[in-house]
Amino acid sequence: MKLLSTRIRFSQRTRRSLVIIAYLSLLSFVLTQLLGEEVAQALRWAFICLYLVLVFTLAYATGLLDAMQSRYLDERQETLRNRAHRLAFVPVNYFVLGILLSLNLANHWFEEPVFIALVSALGTAIFTLPAVIIAWLEPDPVEESTPPSHKVAL
């Protein structure tokens, strides 16, 4: 008995649009930090709120497949979830860790607002990558059709 729906919602085009807009909002969040403190302060929460709305919509669109426990998934869904985690986390974790450590050791940037925004955006992007991969790779959902009723004429 499945308690939670793991059904993929929305078309692949819509899900990909959500992914692109979400990551553009993260990029915009980081770029606003370069415009100065007044502009950054005014736009910071707007981009954060936009990103949160997009991420929750993306989670709904993918049926939270990336976060489901194995007991709620069939074999295909579990394989897709594991593939998304593998594609998202293995290379990105090493890359981000190496860059952050080298930048901090060389420049002591952890006090700069731009660097803090960049670290926050990268951390959030890494956290959402499995859902992004599922939304991007899954084809459009197939509509369930009811079989035609066969009436026998007597």
Image: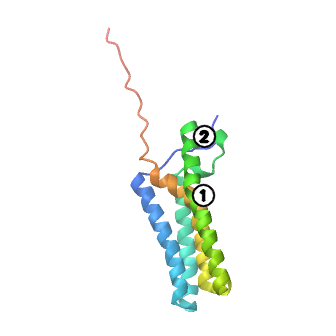
> Residue flagged by tag 2: what amino acid is it?
Leu
Q: Nearest the camera: 120 or 107?
A: 107
* Quarter of the figure with the N terminus: top right
Query: From what the image shows, is residue 1 above or below residue 31?
Result: above
> Residue flagged by tag 1: what amino acid is it?
Val
* N-terminal label among 1 and 2: 2
Instruction: State the CA–CA distance, disc 1 to disc 2.
Output: 23 Å
* Quarter of the figure with the C terminus: top left
Q: Nearest the camera: 63 or 147?
A: 63
| Residue 81 in sight from this viewpoint | yes
Q: Which residue is mark 2?
A: 73
Q: Secondary structure at mark 2?
A: loop
Query: From what the image shows, is residue 112 above or below residue 118?
Result: below
Query: From what the image shows, is residue 85 above or below residue 153?
Result: below
Query: From what the image shows, is residue 27 above or below residue 37?
Result: above
Report the disc number at residue 90. 1
* Residue 56 picture quarter: bottom right
Q: Nearest the camera: 105 or 129?
A: 105
Q: Residue at image x 56%, y 60%?
A: 129
